[in-house]
Image (cartoon, rainbow, N blue to C red):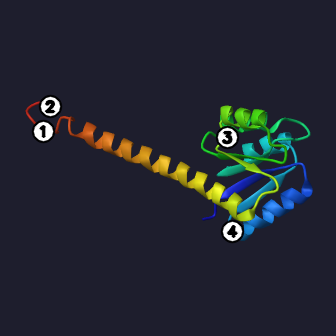
Amino acid sequence: MNESVLVIDDDAAVRKVLSEILSENGYSVVTVENGKQALKTSEKEYFDAALIDVELPDIQGTELLRKLKDRNPKMVKIIVTGFPSLQNAIEAVNEGADGYVLKPFKPKELLETIRKHLDEKTAEYLRLRMEIDESNRFTDQFKKPKGSMFSR
């Protein structure tokens, strides 16, 4: 597996629990406590996924979500919140969240959500790769062969 996850939460206890759950399940984990640290860390290091708290001290999680999406569109971004609301859910979806997890979360459900979205991103990448390969094979059929009567 060896996928990396950035955990962004202002609650040290939540960061610790998430880090332990993810590490025990084979993920490489980096934790930060606010949006500024998240942006700085994501500039230096690539992450396969980010778990983003909605209520951060310096930025709304949905705004951070948009900024992370702009920097790394391939990253799986999952909102984690203890303050569920229809407005938060709509904003998260509109800003490109891949998932939405409620606190307190069940470790199994959290891991399933992360795995599902990482697998979907991988499948999307492989599908696009196959389309590119097929397109290249199709294009190669129309190239003029060297030494033929058509080449000069």
Closest to the camera, between mark 2 and mark 4, is: 4
Give the residue at mark 2.
151
Mark number, residue 147: 1
Q: Is residue 45 visible?
A: no
Which badge, 4 or 3, comes first in the chain's sequence? 4
Q: Amino acid at mark 3?
A: Ala
Which quadrant is home to the N terminus?
bottom right
Q: Amino acid at mark 1?
A: Gly
Marks 1 and 4 sit apart, C-alpha to C-alpha, by 58 Å
Are the two marked residues, 2 and 1, in contact with CB atoms closer than 8 angstroms?
Answer: yes
Which residue type carries mark 2? Ser
**Residue that numbered label 3 is attached to:** 97
Label 3, residues with CA under 10 Å away: few <14, some 14-19, many ≥20: many
- Mark sitting on residue 96: none
Residue 25 marker: 4
Tell which circle, 1 or 4, labels the residue nearer the N-terminal end: 4
User: Which residue appears at 85% of the width and 40% of the height?
Assistant: 36
Q: Amino acid at mark 4?
A: Asn
Please name the residue shown 10% across and 36% down the image: 148
Between the C-alphas of marks 2 and 1, the distance is: 6 Å
